[in-house]
Amino acid sequence: MTKTYLLVLQERAKLCNDLNKLTNLVPSFEIAGVVNSFTDAKLILEKFPIDAFIVEMKDLSEIFMQSIEGIASLPVKPVIAVFTPMQDDMALAKLRKRGCNLIFRVPCEIEEAAEELKRTITLQKKNASPLSVRLPYNKPLDERLANIFIASGIPPHIKGYQFLREAVKLAVHTPSMINNITKQLYPSVASHYNTTSSKVERAIRHAIDVAWSRGKIDNINNIYGIKVFSKGERPTNGELIALISDKIIIEGIS
């Protein structure tokens, strides 16, 4: 079996402990080393064939951005994956622009991260460009979502509005989440707001019910330019999240 070598730059031991699970989830994965500085990482990456460089990031700084850009400019670039609790969408978009391939918002499901990492490494090995969500820089993601929600009749003062916004943002950054709403998407939103998955699900459903009762859900057809929903047709939580996140992703790919 051909090995896939990972290099880890970490600040916390927990990250490495979590990533050790990757070797069980993906037998071909092997952690080749753990470093605590970009200088050490670059020395290894210049000398050894590393398939993926995994970084834990707490705060964004220009030095960090330059370091990522330096790794991305190596003659043989590894897949760059960043694990971060950051919520600043514009900052994360800039990070992608500097050469980062994957961004995982922690806490996240290590199983899903393993699948995304495996897929992207496979594409890179085939000399294909890894799929990467790039967001337009002229408007913040929150503003774009606000425009969609308000036009759809979802009032910003209810909890479901906030939960739905976070759910869409998560689906934009990690598209695979939309295929695992109950076990991954709702728990991630719940963790962010210190609540439960069931409350997140109910609040989002209530927000959609409010929009549907106001008769404004039909405005989605105008937003998309096609007839997405027939009159009186109420979308499910998953349908609406998938629809909006997919629109954001498509608009963000140049």
Image (cartoon, rainbow, N blue to C red):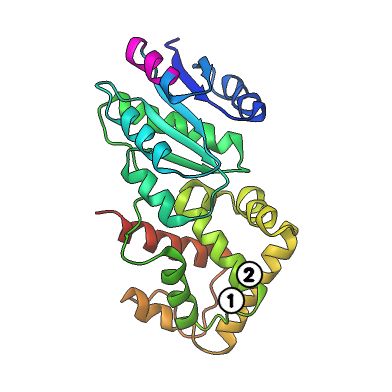
In this view, the residue in front, 90 or 81, is: 90
Q: Could you tell whether 73 is left or right of 166 in the image? A: left
Dominant secondary structure (helix, strand or loop) of the stretch shown in magenta: helix
Q: What is the CA distance from the residue labelled 1 to the residue labelled 2?
A: 6 Å
Q: Which residue lies furthest to the bottom in this view?
A: 214
**Residue at disc 1, secondary structure:** helix
* Amino acid type, label 2: Ile
State the residue at coordinates (56%, 27%).
10
Name the disc covering residue 208, or none: 1
Q: Could you tell whether 224 is left or right of 211 in the image? A: left
**Quadrant of the rendered image containing residue 204:** bottom right
Residue 73 against residue 248 in the figure, above or below:
above
Residue 196 included in the magenta stretch of the image: no
Q: Where is residue 228 in the image (x, y as percent from the top left)?
A: 40, 74
Quadrant of the snapshot with the N terminus: top left
**Residue ID for mark 2:** 204
Name the disc covering residue 75, or none: none
In this view, the residue in front, 254 or 210, is: 254
Q: What stretch is highlighted in magenta?
A: 40-48
In this view, the residue in front, 80 or 113, is: 80
State the residue at coordinates (68%, 63%).
200
Residue 226 against residue 57 in the figure, above or below:
below
Q: Where is residue 71 in the image (x, y as percent from the top left)?
A: 34, 28
Quadrant of the snapshot with the C terminus: bottom left
**Residue at disc 2, secondary structure:** helix
Q: Are dots 1 and 2 in contact, CB under 8 Å?
A: yes
Q: How crowded is mark 2: few (under 14 residues within 10 Å), some or many (20 or more)?
A: many
